[in-house]
Amino acid sequence: DPTTLKIAILERRVNFNDEVETDALVEAIEILGINPALVVIDTLSKNSGGLDENSNSEVKAFIGNIDNKVRRRFSTAVLICHHTGHSEAGRARGASALEADTDAAYIIKREPTTRIVTVSRERFKDSADLAPLTYQAEIIDLGDRDEFDQPVTSIALVPADPEMVSARAEGQPRGGQQKTLLRLLRRLAAESESELIWTSGDLAKIGRDAGMPRATARDAAASLTGFYLVATVGGYRLKRAGE
C-alpha cells in the first residue's frame, strides 16, 4: 500500500566520499526514525564528490565508507546505480574494485526500439548464476493533469514472458552489417577451442577489420550487444544452445 510504505527521498547530492557528509546523512535517517531495508544511491557519479572512478584505491575507500557507516549501521542493503562504459557495456564503468568489493552486480539494458528490459544475474559473490529477469515497461496514467492540461504519466516495469524475447532473439539481425559481424563471430567461435568473450571495442574492431567504416562497425557492434549476444563477465559471448 503506497500510503503506508515508508519511503524517504533526498533530492540532493550526498558525497559518500566524505565521512562528515555521510555521518550527517546517517544522523538524518536516525531522526526520521526509519531503519531502512534498502538504501539506493542514484547515481554513483552524482554522490561521490571528486572520486576518481578509475582508481581502485579510491573506489575501495568509497565502498568501505558506505559499508561501515551505512550498511553495517542499519543492517541494510545498499544499491548503487552506476553506468556502463561507452565501449564496455557488459561491465560497470571505471575501476574493477566496484564489482570486486560488492556482493552482486546486475546489468540492466533495454532492447532498442522496444519497451523490453532485461536484468542480468550472472555476478554473485556467494551463489551461482541465475537466469535473467525480463520486464515490459508500461505507461501508467497517474490520474492527474499538468499545467498544460496533459495527463501525468509514469512508467512501471511488469514481468514479461522470456519466451517472447527469446523468440525474437532466435531470428537474424535486421541490418546487413549486423549479419556480417554476427557471421564473423560465429566463425571465430567455431575455430576456437574455448568460449570467446568480446568487449564492445573488440566487436567494433572485428567489423573494421572486415572493411566496415568506423561508425558502421561501432553501430553494428552496439546492435548485437543490445540483443543478439549475452552480457557476461568481461564482455559479451554468443548465445549457447537452448538460450
Image (tube, rainbow, N blue to C red):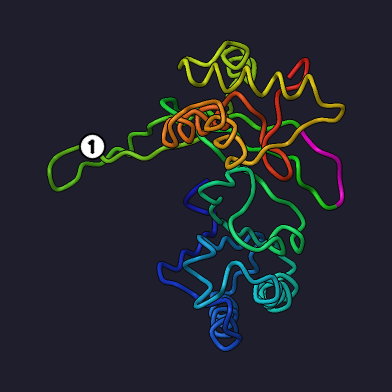
Residue placed at 70% from the left, 19% from the top?
186
What segment is highlighted magenta in the picture? 126-130
As for residue 127 lying within the magenta part, the answer is yes
Residue 10, image x, y percentages: 45, 68
Task: Provide the major secondary structure of the magenta segment.
Answer: loop
Establish if 190 lies above or below 43.
above
Residue placed at 50% from the left, 65% from the top?
45
Q: Nearer the viewer, residue 184 or 99?
A: 184
Taking 219 as reference, is 187 left or right? right
Q: Nearer the viewer, residue 114 or 29?
A: 114
Q: Is residue 158 visible?
A: no
Taking 231 as reference, is 180 left or right? left
As for residue 83 lying within the magenta part, the answer is no
Taking 42 as reference, is 243 left or right? right
Q: Nearer the viewer, residue 212 or 189?
A: 212
Residue placed at 14% from the left, 48% from the top?
147
Mark 1 lies on a secondary structure that is: strand
- Give the residue at the far bottom of this rendering: 20
Counting the numbered discs, the total is 1
Which amino acid type is marked by label 1? Pro
- For label 1, the residue is 151
Quadrant of res 71 = bottom right
Q: Nearer the viewer, residue 164 or 141?
A: 164
